[in-house]
Amino acid sequence: MAYSIDRYPSADSPRLGAMTLHPVAESVPRARRWFRKFIAPYNPACSIDDCVLMISELVTNAILYGRADETWMVRVAWYRVETSLRVEVHNPGFPASVRLRQPDAGDAHGRGLLLVDSIADSWHSGPSRFGGTVVSFTMADAWSPDEVFGPVLF
């Protein structure tokens, strides 16, 4: 697994971190572990457990539904946008296929976006700037408006 972290976030660089994952089942727990590790120093007021659950669902969906003719990766990035935390999951595939489902009680799949919809303050899907699809969620009021980040060293 590859990952990168912005060590000195600023107004010019709202990205707090990113990771690139192979589209395999083992990437879901890796995404959870790495997000938890790299978001902790920023001490967001929102629930990290809720974010980890939503990342699990979105990375799983990216792995299950991403499509490309050549080798591809799932990209996860997280940003501070004013006082909010925004998490994006990118994968190859057609954006129009992302939709909320209403699964029957016996259905084994189809609840991931319902979880995201019920937990996040907002979520969005559409074309990714990398090509393919991005699904993102936002957690409002993750930080105080007057909270300033200093250097985060690992």
Image (cartoon, rainbow, N blue to C red):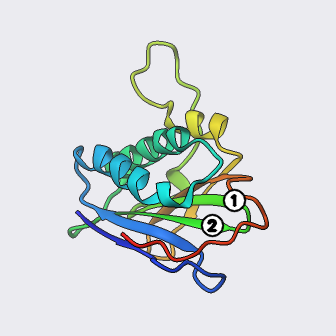
Residue 93 is situated, as x and y percent measured from the top left of the image, at 41, 61
Is residue 49 placed above or below 34 in the rendered structure? above
Instruction: Using the numbered discs, state the Cα–Cα distance from disc 2 to disc 1 in whole angstroms.
Output: 6 Å
Residue 63 is situated, as x and y percent measured from the top left of the image, at 32, 50
Using the image as rendered, state which of residue 59 and residue 131 is in the foreground: 59
Left or right, 104 with respect to 45, comes to: left
Residue 67 is situated, as x and y percent measured from the top left of the image, at 32, 59
* Amino acid, disc 2: Arg
Residue with the mark numbered 2 = 80
The N terminus, quarter of image = bottom left
Q: Residue furthest bottom?
A: 12
The image's mark for residue 84 is 1
The residue shown at (72%, 52%) is 140
Is residue 70 placed above or below 44 in the rendered structure? below
Using the image as rendered, state which of residue 99 and residue 10 is in the foreground: 10
Secondary structure of residue under mark 1: strand
Q: Are marks 2 and 1 in contact (CB under 8 Å)?
A: yes
* Amino acid, disc 1: Ser
The residue shown at (44%, 74%) is 131
The C terminus, quarter of image = bottom left
Using the image as rendered, state which of residue 8 and residue 95 is in the foreground: 8
In the figure, residue 11 lies in which quadrant? Answer: bottom right
Residue 72 is situated, as x and y percent measured from the top left of the image, at 26, 66
In the figure, residue 125 lies in which quadrant? Answer: bottom right
Secondary structure of residue under mark 2: strand
Mark 1 crowd level (few <14, some 14–19, many ≥20, 10 Å Cα): many
The image's mark for residue 49 is none
The residue shown at (24%, 44%) is 25
